[in-house]
Image (cartoon, rainbow, N blue to C red):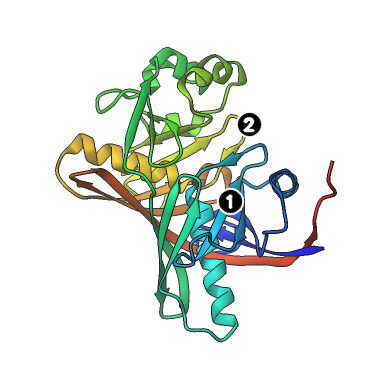
Amino acid sequence: MRYRYVTADVFTGHAYLGNPLAVVLDAQGLDASQMQRIAREFNYSETSFVMPARDPAHTARVRIFTPDREVPFAGHPNVGTAVVLAREQIAAGRPAPQAFVFEEEAGLVRIALVYGERGLQGAQLLAPQPLSRGSEAPVEAVARALRLAPADIAVSEHAPMVVSVGLPFLVVQLASREALRRAAPNSCGYAALMPQLGAKSIYAYTTDTAGNTTDAPTDIQARMLTGRMTEDPATGSATAAVTALRASIAGKGDLRLRVGQGVDMGRASLLLAEAQPRDDGVWAKVSGQAVVVMEGTLPAPAGH
């Protein structure tokens, strides 16, 4: 049996920028090991698999795989999957959808579709969980993991720490845009630091953006350096978590941020994030554009 797939570049309005995603449609005939093999074949940051929802009131059940594991939630797969599914509905002659609800391991992900003068443009997701904070990490160990000096790590607003709105990341604020540009994953540093924290990847960011004329205007520039020693061009789940963290620290109500990512690897991405403190925690939303790039079919991997 063959399965249809569509790829999209997410958090960009231009093909071949942003973060690529593969969406496998009508994937209910695949088991987890087959999904993992397909995700490894695409070798994108994530591949999503769309299946019928368990609850008919919801849009779909979505499973998300990196090349080496399944994750309970991620940002760019939700934005990209929503755009792909909306595009499918419109192409079939059905009314343009306004909202979706995806069932995922981390919980329900509510998504609003975004339209403009040229029609479907992107989507905005509400993270499935409020901000949670985990362990703090020693500055020296973080600097080693990123091949930086301890002085490159900024701690005046928050220490390096694990945060999550559905998927945990070690979040590190850097002192300068130049330090962000120099950062590179160190496998020995990751192995010594990350297992004890319960996170796989480091999201490094800086608010030093005003004087960098080569970057698009943003409040934050960021990079995601993964435990696989690769870089993710755009990370919605981590962006949501950082926005929620900064909102909780500021204590001034809602916070909105324009976040640039992927610039230093040639896949410039723009993420629009907002966080809202409520009685039950700090909740975050992330929005961005997405463009379809490729379509095709693939065979189901043979069983072991």
Q: Which comes sooner in the sequence, label 2 or label 1?
A: 1
Q: Is residue 125 above or below residue 113?
A: above
Badge 1 element = strand
The quarter of the picture where residue 157 lies is: top left
Work out whether residue 35 or residue 57 is closer to the camera in this orientation and state it.
57
Q: Which residue lies at the image location 79% right of the left edge and 60% below the top edge?
A: 298
Closer-to-camera residue (257/178): 257
Residue 228 is marked as: 2
Q: CA distance from mark 2 to mark 1?
A: 20 Å
Residue 240: percent from left, percent from top? 37, 46
**What residue occupies the far left of the structure in this picture?**
252
Q: Amino acid at mark 1?
A: Arg
Q: Amino acid at mark 2?
A: Arg
From the viewer's perspective, is the residue at label 2 or at label 1 nearer? 1
- Mark 1 sits on what residue? 63
The label number, if any, that marks residue 200 in the structure image: none
Q: Is residue 251 above or below residue 258?
A: above
